[in-house]
Structures are given as structure tokens and as C-alpha cells.
């Protein structure tokens, strides 16, 4: 595949905005789409303040920062994606919603374009089956926040071609990331291991074993994790954690993956974590899409 010159990202939430920022900072023109214009304007200011912070800390040069901001274009019109070489989807973690988006992307995107999903857990093979180009569909799972985290987990669907894999790996390396590769099984590598731990932290809270603060302090100081599991769940988004647990539970068919009722209740109550100002903890400040 020829060098990727234009990337398009669907979903301007915490992951999509961070992915667009990574692409722009690495000299690639990028379209960022969300159906909600308010999300796009929030994404634009959070990308701009993150880039300014990175420049003032010396993480990137002024020239790179200014260039990145020029490369970013916001759009509520998905049709603008027809010029993109590589499209990365980062919308809500729902198989049905992602599949209907891929049906549309397949029609809009040029025939050579690769369609990647940033899904945390959903089958790439099934997403790909909603398109006429399953060989050009792949999982490209960034970690949160994308500008800071070094890892990209690439997931090959049953039909993903070697060329698609090679182009996605090359792009990830151009972003300065380290790549790991997973086969297409529920929640892949990182979330297969991480989410049951987070779910267990909810069970520990739910059954009254300890306070949320002691659970988080225990895991931070007892296992040298930078964040406790409940804090991390708030950072990821409790809706995302619940969706991943449901994919694990359904896909692997073992009751050990049953989502904790307290996690379900928080999501039902709209306590989605930092992005909503309340999850396990309450947050007085507006959350940032990156903590750079
Ligand atoms: P988010 O809730 O912050 O953002 C999702 C965005 O998608 C929202 O702005 C919403 O308006 C938009 N959206 C929903 N349906 C749409 C559609 N049909 N067309 C256009 N825009 C649409 O969610 P977040 O956290 O950014 O997650 C996005 C994806 O990334 C999910 O698949 C999630 O599992 C995955 N992910 C999340 C991580 C995290 O730590 N939050 C880490 C790695 C992957």
C-alpha cells in the first residue's frame, strides 16, 4: 500500500480525539468526525490545549505543534471521508452500532482504503463481515490516552490480509508506538486480562470487603500500578468497561466474566466515570481527553 497521507477518524470522544491528535502530530492530514457538533468543538479545544501543554513541556517542538493544528479538520459529514487512505473508527462500544457504521464507511471510502476499528473487545471478523472488503478491515486498539500511551494492539480478523496488517503496523510505528498482535478472540490481550481485574475490584466494593479508597490504594501501593482499578475504570469509562465484560461473558461463556451488579447499576444511573463528572468517584473539574 502507498504511504498513508490522509487519515479519517470517526468518533470525537476521548479516544477519537486523542487518535486524531497522534496522527496530526506525526505529520498526517486528519479528518475528525462526530455526529455531535458539540463533541467536535470540545475535541478541538482539548486537542489544542494538549498540544500547547506538550510544546510548553518540550515534549514536541513549536513547529510540530503548529503544523499539527493545521493538519486537523473537523467534520459532521461522513461523506468527507472519501479521500482518506486509512479510516479509524472510535465510536461507542456496541457491535450493532459499529457494524452499521462500517456498512456506511464501506460505501463512502475509496476502494483502496483500510477500515480500522479501535474496539476494546468486539470481534473484528464480525465487524468486517458487514463490509465488502473484509481483507481491508483490522483492529487497531490504542490505549488511553493515545498521545501518551506507547502501545497499539493490532487485531487480525479471520480475513485480514497480510498487506492490511503490514500497513497498519507501519502506521503504528510511524506514530512511534510499540505493536503487539492478537488473534480475534473476545477482548484480545490487554482487556482480556485488565477488565476481569476491574470487575473483581467492583465485586470487592459491592460485597463490602473494603472502601473504594482502600481498594485503589491497595492495588496502587501493593502491586505498583500507577492507578487503582476503580480510578482506572472511571478514567476508561464505566460504559466501556461494562460492554467489554459483556463481550467476554457472552464470547467465552464462563460465569467468571459476569459483570458485577454494581458496575451495571452505575452505568444504568449514568455514572459513566470522569467523562460525566461522576463514576465510582466524583470529579469537580471538566475531564481532559489527555493528561499530557
Ligand atoms: P466516548 O464515549 O468518549 O466517545 C464516543 C464518541 O462516538 C461520542 O463522541 C459519540 O458522539 C460518538 N458516536 C457514537 N456513535 C456515532 C456514530 N454512529 N457516528 C459518529 N459518531 C458517533 O468513547 P471512547 O472512550 O472514546 O471509546 C470509543 C471507542 O474506543 C470504543 O469502542 C471503546 O471501547 C474504545 N476504547 C476506549 C478506551 C478507553 O479507555 N475509553 C481505550 C481503548 C479503546
Image (cartoon, rainbow, N blue to C red):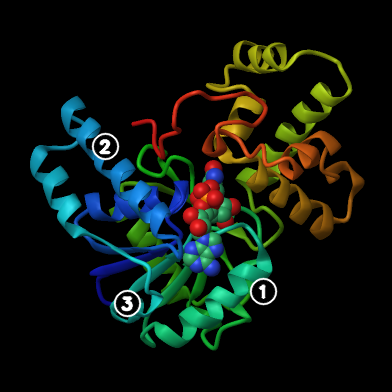
Q: Secondary structure at mark 1?
A: helix
Query: Circle 1 sits on which residue?
Result: 126
Query: Circle 3 sits on which residue?
Result: 80
Q: Secondary structure at mark 2?
A: helix
Residue 185 visible in rendering: yes
Q: Which residue is pictured at 71% across the width and 33% down the height?
A: 198
- Disc nearer the start of the sequence (1/2): 2
- Disc nearer the start of the sequence (3/1): 3
Is mark 3 in CB contact (under 8 Å) with mark 1?
A: no
The quadrant in which the C terminus is found is: top left
User: Along the horizontal axis of the image, is 250 left or right of 42?
Assistant: right
Query: Circle 2 sits on which residue?
Result: 49
Q: Which residue is pictured at 62% across the width and 69% down the height?
A: 97
Q: Nearer the viewer, mark 3 or mark 1?
A: 3
**Are there few (<14), some (14-19), or many (20+) residues within 10 Å of tag 1?**
some
Q: Position of residue 111 (x, y in %)?
A: 39, 88
Q: Position of residue 139 (x, y in %)?
A: 53, 63
Q: Quadrant of residue 40?
A: bottom left
Is mark 1 in CB contact (under 8 Å) with mark 2?
A: no
User: Along the horizontal axis of the image, is 20 left or right of 144?
Assistant: left
Q: CA distance from mark 1 to mark 2?
A: 37 Å
Q: Nearer the viewer, residue 247 or 11?
A: 11
Q: CA distance from mark 2 to mark 3?
A: 26 Å
Amino acid at each position: 500500500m502507498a504511504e498513508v497521507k490522509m487519515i479519517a477518524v470517526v468518533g470525537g470522544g476521548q479516544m477519537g480525539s486523542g487518535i486524531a491528535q497522534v496522527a496530526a502530530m506525526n505529520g498526517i492530514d486528519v479528518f475528525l468526525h462526530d455526529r455531535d457538533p458539540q463533541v467536535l468543538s470540545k475535541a478541538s479545544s482539548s486537542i489544542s490545549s494538549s498540544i500547547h501543554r506538550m510544546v510548553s513541556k518540550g515534549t514536541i517542538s513549536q513547529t510540530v505543534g503548529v503544523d499539527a493544528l493545521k493538519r486537523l479538520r473537523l467534520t459532521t459529514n461522513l461523506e468527507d471521508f472519501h479521500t482518506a487512505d486509512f479510516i479509524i473508527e472510535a465510536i461507542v462500544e456496541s457491535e450493532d452500532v459499529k457494524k452499521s457504521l462500517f456498512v456506511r464507511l464501506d460505501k463512502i471510502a475509496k476502494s483502496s482504503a483500510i477500515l480500522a476499528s479501535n474496539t476494546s473487545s468486539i470481534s473484528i471478523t464480525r465487524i468486517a463481515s458487514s463490509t465488502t472488503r473484509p481483507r481491508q478491515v483490522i483492529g487497531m486498539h490504542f490505549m488511553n490516552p493515545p498521545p501518551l500511551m506507547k502501545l497499539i494492539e493490532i487485531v487480525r480478523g479471520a480475513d485480514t490480509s497480510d498487506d492490511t496488517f503490514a500497513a497498519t503496523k507501519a502506521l503504528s510505528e510511524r506514530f512511534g508506538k510499540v505493536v503487539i498482535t492478537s488473534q480475534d478472540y473476545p477482548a484480545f490481550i490487554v482487556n482480556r486480562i485488565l477488565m476481569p481485574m476491574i470487575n473483581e475490584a467492583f465485586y470487592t466494593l459491592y460485597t463490602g470487603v473494603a472502601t473504594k479508597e482502600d481498594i485503589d490504594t491497595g492495588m496502587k501501593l501493593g502491586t505498583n500500578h500507577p492507578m487503582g482499578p476503580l480510578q482506572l475504570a472511571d478514567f476508561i469509562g464505566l460504559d466501556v468497561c461494562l460492554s467489554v465484560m459483556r463481550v467476554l461473558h457472552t464470547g467465552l461463556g464462563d460465569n467468571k466474566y459476569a459483570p458485577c451488579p454494581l458496575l451495571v447499576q452505575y452505568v444504568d444511573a449514568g455514572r459513566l466515570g470522569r467523562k460525566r463528572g461522576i463514576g465510582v468517584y466524583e470529579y469537580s473539574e471538566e475531564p481532559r481527553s489527555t493528561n499530557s
